[in-house]
């Protein structure tokens, strides 16, 4: 597009800023942007005024080429606005309205301007339309990337919350798993478990799969990866929570975990205590005195 077109639009914005700004803000308000409660009218006015100023400067210095260096401040502001609104929970249409709603005030200002010929008006309408469309698409692109980043981060946070590593005893950890194990979640499981093994100097880690609905070949592979990683860190692994249905499925599939497995977390914990040389004792109170009574089949605590 010719540089003159950018200069003409810049002049239009400069001459009519006092009329364009309130009309633009009002259109955004009518679109319901304030009803979300995520932005105040003062913030909306400030954002609109700042962008109008940056747009004017870009048009003067860079014409209508939105990829030019002159548009960098305007693009930076739109990128920040898009990222902020994505994190605040705005919809794509609510975010895009910030740019696209500027068209009508510009066209209205052009209609009120009596200094332009019909040919100039047509040229400026086309120039403004293409310019704002490009900036609007840029805004949506940044918004989409930001939304995807938010979703990925939230998924990871949920995955971390759903795979807590619990300290059962000194040197003994438990990792209760709930839900399906896939490659992404297995990676989070391994990272959490290995880091806790290092932090607590754990000797044994119990992986409890009571909450895992099914164990197929792929799930078994993920479990084996976790066990192997824990062994490399110097910790032995036990697996608990293998229900009869899961045991039958594993036998049918020929899955070999090659680790000690127990039906319940309590049984696995008892084995872990034995392996670490501990014995559970039950205290007895006799005439005001407490004595330690060794529990049969137990371990030291």
Image (tube, rainbow, N blue to C red):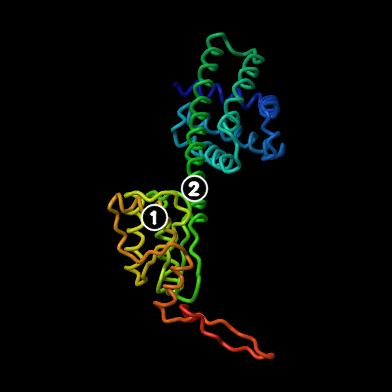
Q: Position of residue 246 (x, y in %)?
A: 39, 52
The residue that appears at 47% across and 50% down in the rendered structure is: 179
Q: Position of residue 92 (x, y in %)?
A: 55, 32
Image: 194 above or below 293: above
The residue that appears at 67% across and 15% down in the rendered structure is: 112
Chain-order first, disc 2 or disc 1:
2
Label disc, if present, on residue 155 of the rendered structure: 2
Identify the element where label 2 is drawn.
helix
For marks 2 and 1, give the CA distance.
Answer: 13 Å
Tag 2 near tag 1, CB within 8 Å: no
Q: Nearer the viewer, residue 247 or 82?
A: 247
Label disc, if present, on residue 197 of the rendered structure: none
Q: Position of residue 47 (x, y in %)?
A: 63, 37
Horizontal arrangement in the rendering, residue 255 relative to residue 133 (left or right): left
- Farthest-out residue, top: 118
Q: Residues within 10 Å of mark 1 (few under 14, many from 20)?
A: some
Identify the element where label 1 is drawn.
helix
Q: Residues within 10 Å of mark 2 (few under 14, many from 20)?
A: few
Q: Nearer the viewer, residue 56 or 274?
A: 274
Q: Position of residue 235 (x, y in %)?
A: 37, 71
Total count of labels = 2
- Farthest-out residue, left: 254
Say which quarter of the image contains residue 100: top right
The residue that appears at 60% across and 34% down in the rendered structure is: 53
Quadrant location of the N terminus in the rendered image? top left
Label disc, if present, on residue 187 of the rendered structure: 1
Q: Nearer the viewer, residue 279 or 79?
A: 279
Image: 154 above or below 296: above
Image: 250 above or below 97: below
């Amino acid at each position: 597009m010719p540089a003159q077109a950018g200069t003409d639009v810049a002049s239009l914005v400069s001459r009519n800023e006092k009329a364009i700004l309130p009309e633009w803000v009002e259109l955004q308000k009518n679109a319901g942007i304030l009803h979300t409660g995520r932005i105040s009218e003062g913030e909306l006015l400030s954002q609109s005024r700042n962008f109008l100023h940056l747009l004017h400067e870009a048009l003067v210095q860079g014409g209508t080429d939105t990829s030019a260096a002159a548009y960098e401040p305007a693009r930076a502001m739109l990128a920040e606005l898009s990222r902020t609104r994505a994190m605040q929970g705005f919809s794509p249409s609510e975010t895009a309205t910030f740019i696209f709603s500027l068209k009508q005030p510009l066209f209205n200002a052009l209609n009120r301007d009596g200094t332009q010929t019909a040919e100039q008006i047509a040229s400026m309408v086309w120039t403004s339309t293409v310019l704002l469309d490009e900036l609007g698409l840029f805004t949506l692109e940044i918004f989409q990337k930001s939304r995807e980043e938010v979703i990925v981060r939230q998924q990871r946070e949920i995955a971390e919350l759903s795979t807590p590593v619990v300290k059962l005893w000194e040197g003994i950890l438990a990792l209760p798993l709930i839900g399906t194990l896939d490659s992404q979640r297995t990676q989070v499981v391994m990272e959490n478990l290995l880091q806790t093994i290092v932090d607590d100097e754990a000797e044994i880690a119990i992986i409890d799969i009571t909450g895992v609905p099914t164990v197929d070949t792929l799930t078994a592979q993920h479990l084996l990866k976790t066990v192997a990683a824990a062994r490399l860190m110097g910790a032995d692994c036990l697996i608990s929570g293998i229900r009869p249905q899961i045991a039958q499925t594993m036998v049918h599939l020929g899955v070999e975990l090659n680790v000690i497995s127990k039906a319940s977390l309590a049984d696995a914990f008892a084995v872990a205590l034995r392996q670490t040389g501990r014995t559970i004792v039950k205290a007895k109170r006799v005439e005001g005195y407490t004595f330690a009574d060794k529990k049969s089949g137990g371990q030291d605590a």
